[in-house]
Image: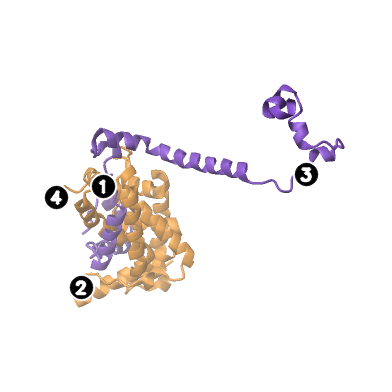
Amino acid sequence: MIPEDDDLRRAEGALPAELAAAFAAARGARAAPEVPPALMARVLADAAAAQPRALPPAPEARKAPGGALAAIARALRPLAGLGGLSTAALAAGLWVGIAQPGAAPDVFALIGLGLEPELALLPDHGGLADFLDPEAGG
Amino acid sequence: MNRPLPPAGADADAALLAAYAAGDAQAAATLAARLLPRSLRLAARLLGDPAEAEDVAQEAMLRLWRAAPGWRADGGARVETWLHRVVVNLATDRLRRRGRTRPLEDAPDPIDPQPSAEAGLIAQGRAAALNAALGRLPERQRIAVVLRHLEALSNPEIAAILDTGVEAVESLLARARRALAADPALRHDIDPDSNPDKEG
């Protein structure tokens, strides 16, 4: 039977006898309901799936294999990405330097000076020309 | 590991829940054995459908498992009261969804005891009449009656489950008792010799 408290007995004592009897009969029914085994199995499966697991030890708490050199290598591991980045940057710069700007316009012609680029870029400064070509200066 | 079963009570349930949250698998089995039967019975009484009652009881227990890591033993809530509240809320949602199309009086009652043929008939008649009368009560009155008179919970426990005050529970119960006492189906069934036509 489902346990009754004094307050409940008093409350039902004030009810019509037939209604109080109906309540008492209803409490007697299903007082100890049987749980279907399949339901209990589902509930326990849910419990197992939802149960918090013990956390694995933190990485720093685990013993580091390989001694001091391995520890240094692990400490520098994040820089490995930077090494890859610098290699990529060097390759890109080299390509920019080698690639021919084939469609580059002649800026001297465009501004109407008609100068040869060589002359403009290497003007005749006498001594320098003699140094480069002694016969011409002689 | 064989865990000695702690005595029933709020502290024992909270301790088991804490043990479950700490990884004790056996604690879940012990808690389920203690809490699932009553949750299932309450759901069946509210819903009148064994299959739906199983679904609600399972869902309520799942919510308990999920609440375990954050459960505060000193938070004031008893585990069983909390679980009953979840069962009531889930059952109420289902009843509203189906629009009470399946009245309580249609519910089978497969685990009733059968002391004798005559007594069994009387008990079945009473149960059917009571279920029919309960089905005509407003929702909260019906829940209050089920919790108080069928589950024998105290008024403060019912107040916690319904998220209301004790006075409001007493008011719900008083109105429900008056309605049940006046319900013709219930009076006719319980007193078969009486003539309802003569009753005022």
Q: Where does the C terminus of chain B fall, quadrant-wise?
A: bottom left
Mark 4 chain: B
Q: Do marks 4 and 3 share a subunit?
A: no
Q: Which residue is mark 2?
A: B114
Q: Residues within 10 Å of mark 2 (few under 14, many from 20)?
A: few
In the rendering, at what x and y percent does residue B122 appear?
A: 26, 73
Q: CA distance from mark 4 to mark 1?
A: 14 Å
- Earlier in the chain: of badge 2 and badge 4, it is 4
Of circles 2 and 4, the one toward us is: 4
- Earlier in the chain: of badge 1 and badge 2, it is 1
Q: CA distance from mark 2 to mark 4?
A: 36 Å
In the image, residue A60 above or below residue B26 = above
Q: Which residue is mark 4?
A: B3
Q: Which residue is mark 1?
A: B17
In the rendering, at what x and y percent does residue B194 appear?
A: 34, 72
Say which chain is purple: A
Q: Which residue is mark 3?
A: A105
Amino acid, disc 4: Arg
- Residue B177 visible to an observer of this rendering: no
